[in-house]
Amino acid sequence: MSLTLEKVNKIYGHGRFGVHAVQDLSLDVAPGEIVALLGSSGCGKTSTLRMIAGLERVSAGEIRLNGRRIDPLPPARRGVAMAFEGYALYPPLSVAENIGFGLTGLRSEERARRVHEVAELLDITDILDRRPSRLSGGQQQRTSLARALIREAELYLLDEPMGQLEPQLRAVLRGRIKAWLKARGAPAILVTHDQTEANAMADRIAIMEGGVLQQFAPPATLRERPANLFVATFFGEPPMNILEGEIEAGALHLAGSAQPLPLPRLRRTP
């Protein structure tokens, strides 16, 4: 199973009042790969996730899952499991009922076993009989996440899945969730503004700004070989220092420095 986005665009509104939220976005996500969409608020990452899920229409471009074009399909026919940032829990149902809601056709014993398994993964076995109104924000978020992870989906979409959790719990769950997703072999997209979370969970990170993809690479590549100045200053903690200078006669002359720095010779690869 793989995911492909080919020159995907999202425009809200029309004419000069329109907002081009996502511009010509192309991504390839391999089977079993976890990709993080990382960027500041308004960069287009959530719009991208919602287009993949079918909650927003694609203005232009195509989305394919395992070679099958899914952007014209309704959400229920896409084979996608999504954890919403806003939880979207059913108030009359208990935590256990919310988690197992989509497991139609299973015997009650099997459904209960799978609900307990994912609840144990997320440390919510002690609240399975509660209603959403009796839960904290972090408990509601883990219930929403459990409802997505329990499904046998072709693609998993996680929208800020741990934003309400305490740092210590978040650190523990990152490894557990990553192992859970890897065991299923399906691609996964994680939307986050947390660089630590993206580094810990993602095989590759897509950095977005102003609706435009800036660089798509493993975390180490983003740190060591940023594609542009924005990536260099945005990614990494602490961010890169930027110094102005000029290259002349094989040396780097930094502004404010009287001593030039010799540049190493670069070996050309065949």
Image (spheres, rainbow, N blue to C red):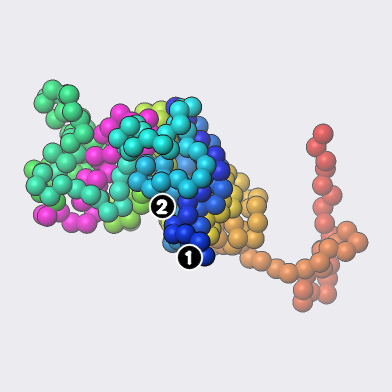
Where on the picture, by quarter, is residue 77? Answer: top left
Which of 200/36 is in front? 36
Residue at image mark 2: 46
**Residue at horizontal 42%, vertical 34%?**
70
Where on the picture, by quarter, is residue 115? Answer: top left
**Residue at horizontal 40%, vertical 30%?**
186
Q: Quadrant of the N terminus?
A: top left
Name the amino acid, label 2.
Thr
Labelled pair 2, 1 in contact (Cβ < 8 Å): no
x and y percent of residue 152 in the render? Answer: 30, 29
Question: What is the residue that sits farthest to the bottom in this orientation?
Answer: 256
Residue at image mark 1: 17
Q: CA distance from mark 2 to mark 1?
A: 21 Å
Q: Quadrant of the C terminus?
A: top right
**Residue at horizontal 41%, vertical 52%?**
46
x and y percent of residue 40 in the render? Answer: 47, 61
Q: Magenta region: which residues? A: 133-156
x and y percent of residue 59 in the render? Answer: 47, 48
Which of 197/1 is in front? 1
Task: Count all numbered tags in the image, as a single digit.
Answer: 2
Q: Circle 1: is it few (<14), some (14-19), or many (20+) Cα within 10 Å?
A: few
Mostly what secondary structure, the magenta segment? Answer: helix
Does 244 appear in magenta? no
Viewer can see residue 246: yes
Q: Circle 2: is it few (<14), some (14-19), or many (20+) Cα within 10 Å?
A: many
Nearest to the eye among marks 2 and 1: give it. 1
Name the amino acid, label 1.
Phe
Q: Is residue 191 above or below residue 248?
A: above
Q: Is residue 8 above or below residue 107?
A: below
